[in-house]
Image (spheres, grey):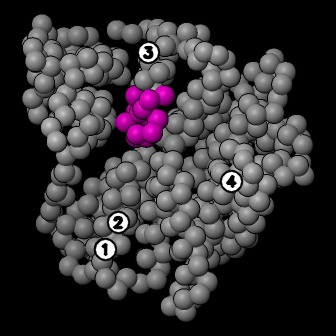
Amino acid sequence: MSKPTPRKDRLEELLALARTYRGWTQKQLADALGRDVHNLVPGGGVPRLDMVLRLAESLDWPVETVIADLCGQTPEPSKIPDENATWIELDRAAYAAAMEGRVADRLTLASRAFAIAKTPDQRAYSSLREAGAWDQLGRYSNAMEAARRGLRERDLSPVVYCDLKGALASAHLMLGDIEEGEALATTLNERLQSDRRFANVYSGARAFVRFLMALASGDRASHGGPDATQLARIAREHYASAKVLAERHASESGSSLHRSIAMGCECGILEMDVLLGEVTPESAIDDLLAGLDADTESQAVPDACLEAIGWSCIVGSQLVLRFVEDPSLADRQLAIFTNKADDIARRTGNWALRERIWMLEYRKAEKGAPLDFSATVLDPEDLRDLTGTMGRFPAFREVGWSLLRGARRIGEV
């Protein structure tokens, strides 16, 4: 089989995107890439490795994503650097960084802790810390790899095994691999119920697993089909049980993460009730709109709980697109939901929320025939968000390119 080679037109598109993303002039882009301003694109269209590395840095994309867009190849991941420090010091520092929201520090410390870990448990815990950091950064493929690496260790404690499996299932779901994520969560849930070694796993971990199962079933139910009603009932049951477990753990530990899970469950139950015909779409939309109160403006609200409110906006938007027939009313309600979701995504740095916001834009355009983005306007901030989202969600890149090629851009340098 012949090795795929980079395409000149794809390189030109990526160069233009990098320039827009950074707000650079042509000269600034050339300087960043180490190229002559008059010779940015090599004659044969094949960039040198150093140029690919600099282009990835300029786009804020993983190197493997840039290469995949150029020619479909994925390089081996780089080795994690070592550091002259004890494992326990690095691990405690990584945990503290996680609690304080210092994601970049958490990632660096977790990576260095793994590099000097000497036991399976140490390597597993470091992998879990790293997976969590990648998840916060929206790098779900990296989170998946970190979780898998931890799970390769032997004789893991039930708690760390459960957390790693949950992280792996969550990454699959965030990337749109619904069947894989659901299978992992379901198998883990069965083990939590039947294996005596897992009897003491804390309620927060159990809540997260049930929540993942609910997300998967709910996603499939929302797409319709002959099994939609049954799937909606299953999802509702999972949401209800996850809510009880999450609230219990949040009450015992004060965990804002598990309070957020409970909030997400409340929203999920409402969505499933609509699909089951037990609540009208209009009533559900009104309830979700009423929930967008002044609390979301308070800086005291934990990011995790703000993110739950953001996800309620996504659910509200989906209900509007699916059920509201009046175009004027739909536009007003969508504007409220998407503006709030966008504000929360920017405040919390949640890339999964951003991806869903862009997909809503795609679904709005999809209602027309043929697909047309000529009325969509992208300013430099939109372009930066769209570019970052494309780098984090491989399944979204086709939609992203459609938006970039069809929309009107303003304010470019």
Crowd around label 3: few <14 · some 14–19 · many ≥20 (10 Å)? few
Location of the C terminus (image quadrant): top left
Q: Where does the image place residue 121, in percent across and percent down from the top left?
A: 32, 80
Residue 193, relative to residue 230: is it above or below? below
Task: Tell me the distance, in whole angstroms, between the alpha carbons under discs 4 and 1.
Answer: 30 Å
Q: Is residue 40 left or right of residue 238?
A: left
Q: Where does the image place residue 184, in percent across and percent down from the top left?
A: 50, 67
**Going 37% across and 36% down the picture, which residue do you hit?**
391
Q: Are marks 4 and 2 in contact (CB under 8 Å)?
A: no
Viewer-proximal residue, 259 or 42? 42
Between discs 2 and 3, the one toward the N terminus: 2
Task: Tell me the distance, in whole angstroms, between the alpha carbons under discs 4 and 2.
Answer: 26 Å
Start-end of magenta stretch: 387-399
Between discs 1 and 3, the one toward the N terminus: 1
Magenta stretch: helix, strand or loop mostly: helix
Viewer-proximal residue, 142 or 98? 142
Q: Are marks 1 and 3 in contact (CB under 8 Å)?
A: no
Residue placed under numbered mark 3 in the picture:
405
Q: Amino acid at mark 3?
A: Arg
